[in-house]
Amino acid sequence: MQFRKPDATDGPAVTALIAACPPLDRNSAYCNLIQCTHFADHCIVAERDGRVVGWVSGHRPPSDPDAFFVWQVAVAAEARGQRLARRMIDALLARPAQAGVKHLITTVTDDNEASWALFRSLARDHGADLERSVAFDRETHFAGAHATEFQARIGPLKKDNMQEERGLS
């Protein structure tokens, strides 16, 4: 398994992987291309035998520069059960582009148990708290067309744990 920054040629594979991973929201192919290029320092692909089997997109919010926002996590069916999502997030946090990150944030619908399990394990293993709050309400923000997105905020991340992860990637 190889982890690397994405580039524009990964756009179609990322788009196909996200489509194969419900309940993920499908972004436009153009959005995925922008993530693979403009946000490459904050995204990662996992590749096995020349095939993209994992994807994590994220960014450093300008309004919260001490945080890293995880946008999407996608793992192909044949790569599940190998802690791949966790390993990709830890590899992203170890990059120089994430220096100074003290909190990991994301939004997750209430029924996405796989994502909640992932983020609970990240909080536990980084010795950090996980705070949960409404980020985008079903009625107020989605006009009833999408489930409420809850924000998970993990932190503060322990510096010792971050240094250990940096040594592993």
Image: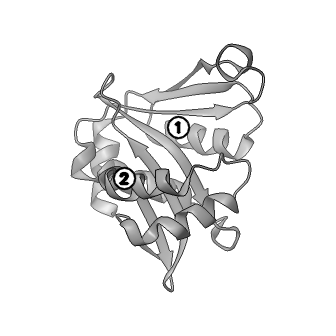
Which picture quadrant has residue 61? top left
User: Which badge, 1 or 2, is on the more N-terminal residue?
Assistant: 2
Q: Which residue is mark 1?
A: 124
Percent across and percent down for residue 136 are 62, 21
* Coordinates of residue 144 in the picture (x, y in percent): 78, 22
At horizontal 35% and vertical 49% (from top left) the residue drawn is 42
The residue located at (45%, 65%) in the rendering is 45
Is residue 139 placed above or below 103 in the rendered structure?
above
Viewer-nearest residue: 109 or 8: 8
User: Which picture quadrant has residue 120?
Assistant: top right
Q: Is residue 162 left or right of residue 150?
A: left
Q: Residue furthest bottom?
A: 49
Crowding at dot 2, Cα within 10 Å, few <14 / some 14-19 / many 20+, comes out as many
Specify few, some or many for label 1: CA neighbours under 10 Å numbering under 14, 14-19, or 20 or more: few
Q: Amino acid at mark 1?
A: Arg
Query: Could you tell me residue 163's position as x and y percent?
Result: 27, 48
Q: Which mark is residue 92?
A: 2
Of residues 126 and 69, the one drawn nearer to the viewer in this rendering: 69
Q: Amino acid at mark 2?
A: Leu
Q: Residue at x 39, y 59 (%)?
A: 36
Instruction: Report x, y in % for residue 153.
Output: 49, 27
- Give whichever of 35, 48 is nearer the camera: 35
